Image (cartoon, rainbow, N blue to C red):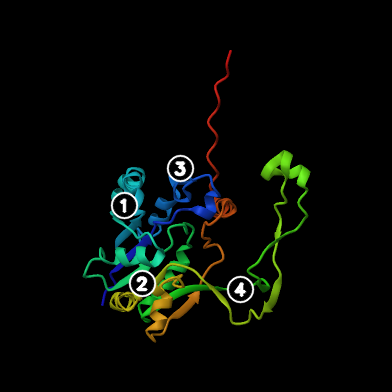
């Protein structure tokens, strides 16, 4: 049977960790003359297995989102729908309603992962032709430590400096207590795209209790809860998700693109 895969790209996040108060949209960041979101969409436009793409944007700012990306998404044949407001799972759930009925498989891919290697996609689609649920993973190489919830300032507050300088006079370094070092053997970081048999993913979402969705950080979790087997293939360390500004610099280096030049400021004579 020929695979017909619809790719869901949840793009309703607020970029809070990336912008750090500056209200920058990470999906709009320039990658070689195109927005990051469009570079992500383009990963799938030439794949023979992909027959549909659904991008789920932020419902509260949908007019602005459509104005910024709508024409570019339409050029690539991607359908734009409104996502959710609560969490990623709700956005995927709403996007599922737009998946064509004839699709045999559904892939879900983070909007902020624009640097997926073509060979990784080959591995995933090859495995998805045999297994019902497939995710890419990479082994955790660094030492993993569990930390306390509480934080404390790494330096004492100087009352005089705080009065004069305000927040600028307060220590910025925060420290947490190491609770334990976790054995990393057998631990892997999960990436996207995740690929599922279409009926399996729909069944998984139909079983989701919305009041217990806070711990649903990817779609494979829901499939696991059904008792179905999820298979993992080798991911790629270059498949970086842009979460903070430093990730964007890394992705630009991976893709071999330079950041846009600042516009020259006109001199005043």
Report the Cα–Cα distance between label 3 and label 2.
Answer: 39 Å
Disc 2 from disc 4: Cα separation: 31 Å
Q: Quadrant of the N terminus?
A: bottom left
Instruction: Indicate the quadrant where residue 154 lies.
Output: bottom right
x and y percentages locating residue 183 in the rendered image: 66, 81
SS class of the residue under badge 1?
A: loop
Mark positioned earlier in the residue sequence (3 or 2): 3
- 121 vs 46: above or below: below
Marks 4 and 3, how far apart at CA: 33 Å
Mark 3 to mark 1 CA distance (whole Å): 16 Å
Mark closer to the chain start, 4 or 1? 1
Mark 1 nearby-residue class (10 Å; few <14, some 14–19, many ≥20):
some
Alpha-carbon span between mark 4 and mark 1: 35 Å
> Label 3 neighbourhood size at 10 Å, few (<14), some (14-19), many (20+)?
few
Read off the residue under disc 2.
Answer: 210
- The image shows residue 90 at horizontal and vertical percentages of 36, 65
Q: Which residue is mark 3?
A: 33
Crowd around label 2: few <14 · some 14–19 · many ≥20 (10 Å):
few
Q: Residue furthest top?
A: 269
Q: Residue at x 28, y 77 (%)?
A: 199
Mark 4 Cα within 10 Å, few/some/many (few <14, many 20+)? some
């Amino acid at each position: 049977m020929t695979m017909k895969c619809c790719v869901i790209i949840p793009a309703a996040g607020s970029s809070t960790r990336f912008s750090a108060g500056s209200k920058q949209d990470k999906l709009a960041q320039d990658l070689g003359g195109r927005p990051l979101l469009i570079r992500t969409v383009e990963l799938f436009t030439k794949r023979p297995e992909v027959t549909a793409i659904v991008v789920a944007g932020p419902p509260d700012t949908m007019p602005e989102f459509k104005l910024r990306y709508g024409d570019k998404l339409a050029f690539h044949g991607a359908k734009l729908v409104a996502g959710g407001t609560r969490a990623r799972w709700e956005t995927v759930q709403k996007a599922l309603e737009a998946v064509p009925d004839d699709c045999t498989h559904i892939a879900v891919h983070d909007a902020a992962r624009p640097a997926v290697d073509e060979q990784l996609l080959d591995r995933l689609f090859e495995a998805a032709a045999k297994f019902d649920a497939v995710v890419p993973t990479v082994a955790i190489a660094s030492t993993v430590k569990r930390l306390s919830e509480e934080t404390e300032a790494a330096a004492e507050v100087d009352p005089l400096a705080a009065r004069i300088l305000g927040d600028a006079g307060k220590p910025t370094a925060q420290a947490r207590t190491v609770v334990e070092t976790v054995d990393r053997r057998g631990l892997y970081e999960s990436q996207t795209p995740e690929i599922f048999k279409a009926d399996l993913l729909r069944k998984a979402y139909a079983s989701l209790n919305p009041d217990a969705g806070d711990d649903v950080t990817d779609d494979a979790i829901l499939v696991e809860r059904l008792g179905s087997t999820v298979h993992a293939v080798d991911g790629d360390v270059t498949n970086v998700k842009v979460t903070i500004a430093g990730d964007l610099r890394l992705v630009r280096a991976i893709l071999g693109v330079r950041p846009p030049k600042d516009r020259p400021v006109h001199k005043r004579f």
